[in-house]
């Protein structure tokens, strides 16, 4: 009997396959997710992209495995939705793993689909978003699945510094499914819903005897406060996707473009007398550097990154005169703003990201030095601290540094000063740019004289005043061209914007090389 093939029959066949793909693990599995307050992969995609703009690729691809009952478990799409569309009118590529299909596990075809969408994003140099919800490699397919997994890592690395890569962790992710996000630029986790682990609690209990819950092992709190691997934490999935969109709004589509310029309607010549009230002239008094940053940038909009990790340093995006800038700032409220191992890592990676994507760097400095102590020395503060030195020296984007109060010791260089390639070095009148704080310096320089003096304390105080007047001030630094301008606090916004405008077309070439060797 010959089956008559018609346009209508094959269109109906196509519609049935598309409907099956859209159902993922089936209506019951999707309903189960809804009862837990979770969205499906396709609902997440719909929330991410501009309405009607998403174009799916490889919707009908399915696993070719037949072992371990896989013949009966095949689903068109193989547990991941891939494609492209517009976010706020800009072309973006994305994939969304579907945990209703074999737990979102990465099989051969699943991995190949993600690799292809990564290739397409890199071809046209558009951002890549991963909506991750996967239990790891698919055991049913054995070692074959490793090609796709390894291919994802390879492409993440190839795309690094070329296109922005953002990973949204929408559910529990384990094993190989956390390494691809780890290579991307930013990770966003959903509080109480997403976890990142290498090995699960059951295996840990079996191997080490330790008892731990999944949330305690790799929840959002762990990765945003302890490991520093989660750059943002969202309260729910909608907030997570909104965070992705806001982050994209600051970034260019690729390394050949300038970041978007958005006029928020804030006067570039606005003076601010509140800054003198926020920052005490008494160096022993603390203040919140966030308040300084917000008063200076456009409409007080500071998009902070890793706010709960290494809180002694602040990093994030803002706008000045409509232009995206990367902010690096010491936080006097925590460890007096000292640099330590984690702060150095946090800042160095952010500096390198900004440099890769043509985002000018603004540094707000109030730093007494590297944090001292045996713990930090043994943790490798020399190696970690050198990462900031390397990152700033390597960066060719505009670099503007403002010294508010303390600029002491090796941390001066780590925050990008004259000699480190800074383009504009500014300082407030109360700032002190010295190797050591005045009292320590005087105690060392005049140690013998202080000891021999009739009134040791009076002699010491006299020398402190002399040293302060002669050296511990920005005017001495300016006289030696170590500071380009001493400015009043109220002028900060205007002077930063003037410097940015002047540096808009900055070009700087580097010696030809394969790549440097940052002290990782």
Image (spheres, grey):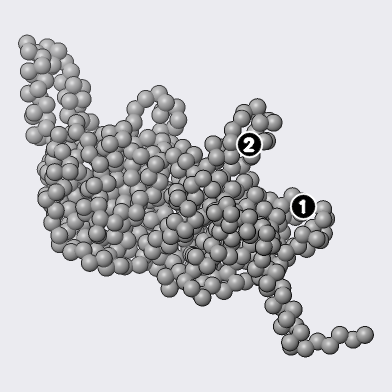
94, above or below 352, in the image: below
| Secondary structure beneath label 2 | helix
| Secondary structure beneath label 1 | helix
CA gap, disc 2 and disc 1: 22 Å
Which disc is residue 157 wearing?
none
State whether residue 154 appears in this view: no
Residue, x 49% and y 44% (percent of image)? 220
Residue, x 28% and y 36% (percent of image)? 333
- Measuring from the top left, give residue 465's x and y in whole percent: 8, 28
- Measuring from the top left, give residue 23's x and y in whole percent: 66, 66
Label 2 or label 1, whichever comes before in sequence order: 1
Which quadrant of the view contains residue 155?
bottom right
Nearer the observer: mark 2 or 1; the answer is: 2
Residue nearest the viewer, comparing 128 with 38: 38
Which quadrant of the view contains residue 27?
bottom right
Q: Which residue is mark 2?
A: 201
Left or right, 337 with respect to 512, comes to left
- Measuring from the top left, give residue 90's x and y in whole percent: 44, 71
402, above or below 311, in the image: below
Residue nearest the viewer, comparing 254 with 277: 277
Which quadrant of the view contains residue 286?
top left
Residue nearest the viewer, comparing 278 with 192: 192
């Amino acid at each position: 009997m010959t089956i008559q093939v018609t346009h209508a029959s094959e269109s109906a066949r196509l519609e049935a396959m598309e409907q099956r793909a859209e159902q993922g693990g089936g209506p019951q599995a999707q309903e189960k997710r809804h009862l837990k307050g979770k969205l499906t992969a396709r609902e997440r995609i719909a929330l991410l992209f501009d309405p009607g703009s998403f174009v799916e690729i490889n919707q009908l691809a399915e696993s070719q495995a037949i072992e371990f009952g896989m013949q009966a478990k095949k689903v068109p799409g193989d547990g991941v939705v891939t494609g492209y569309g517009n976010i706020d009118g800009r072309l973006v590529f994305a994939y969304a793993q579907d945990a209703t299909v074999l737990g979102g596990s990465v099989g051969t075809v699943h991995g190949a689909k993600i690799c292809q969408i990564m290739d397409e994003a890199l071809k046209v140099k558009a951002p890549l978003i991963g909506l991750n919800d996967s239990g790891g490699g698919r055991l049913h397919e054995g070692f074959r699945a490793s090609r796709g997994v390894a291919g994802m890592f390879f492409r993440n690395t190839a795309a690094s510094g070329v296109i922005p890569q953002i990973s949204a962790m929408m559910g529990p992710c384990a094993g190989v499914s956390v390494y691809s996000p780890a290579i991307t630029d930013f990770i966003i986790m959903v509080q109480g819903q997403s976890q990142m682990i290498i090995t699960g609690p059951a295996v840990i209990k079996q191997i080490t005897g330790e008892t731990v819950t999944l949330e305690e092992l790799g929840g959002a709190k762990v990765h945003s406060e302890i490991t520093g691997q989660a750059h943002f934490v969202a309260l729910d999935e909608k907030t997570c996707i909104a965070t992705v969109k806001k982050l994209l709004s600051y970034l260019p589509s690729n390394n050949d473009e300038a970041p978007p310029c958005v006029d928020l309607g804030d006067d570039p010549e606005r003076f601010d007398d509140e800054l003198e009230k926020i920052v005490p002239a008494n160096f022993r008094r603390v203040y919140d550097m966030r308040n300084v940053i917000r008063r200076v940038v456009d409409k007080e909009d500071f998009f902070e990154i890793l706010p709960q990790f290494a809180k002694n340093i602040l990093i994030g995006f803002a706008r000045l005169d409509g232009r995206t800038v990367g902010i690096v700032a010491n936080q006097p409220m925590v460890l007096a703003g000292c640099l330590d191992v984690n702060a150095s890592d946090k800042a160095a990676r952010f500096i390198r990201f900004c440099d890769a994507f043509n985002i000018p760097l603004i540094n707000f400095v109030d730093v007494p030095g590297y944090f001292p102590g045996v713990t930090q020395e043994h943790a490798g503060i020399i190696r970690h601290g050198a990462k900031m030195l390397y990152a700033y020296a390597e960066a060719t984007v505009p670099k503007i540094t403002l010294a508010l109060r303390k600029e002491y010791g090796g941390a001066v260089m780590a925050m990008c000063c004259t000699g480190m390639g800074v383009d504009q070095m500014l300082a407030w009148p109360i700032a002190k740019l010295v190797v050591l704080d005045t009292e320590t310096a005087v105690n060392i320089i005049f140690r013998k004289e202080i000891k021999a003096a009739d009134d040791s304390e009076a002699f010491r105080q006299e020398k402190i005043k002399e040293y302060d007047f002669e050296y511990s001030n920005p005017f001495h630094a300016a006289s030696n061209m170590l500071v380009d301008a001493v400015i009043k606090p109220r002028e900060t916004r205007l002077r930063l914007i003037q410097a940015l405008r002047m540096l808009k077309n900055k070009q700087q070439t580097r010696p030809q090389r394969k790549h440097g060797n940052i002290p990782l």
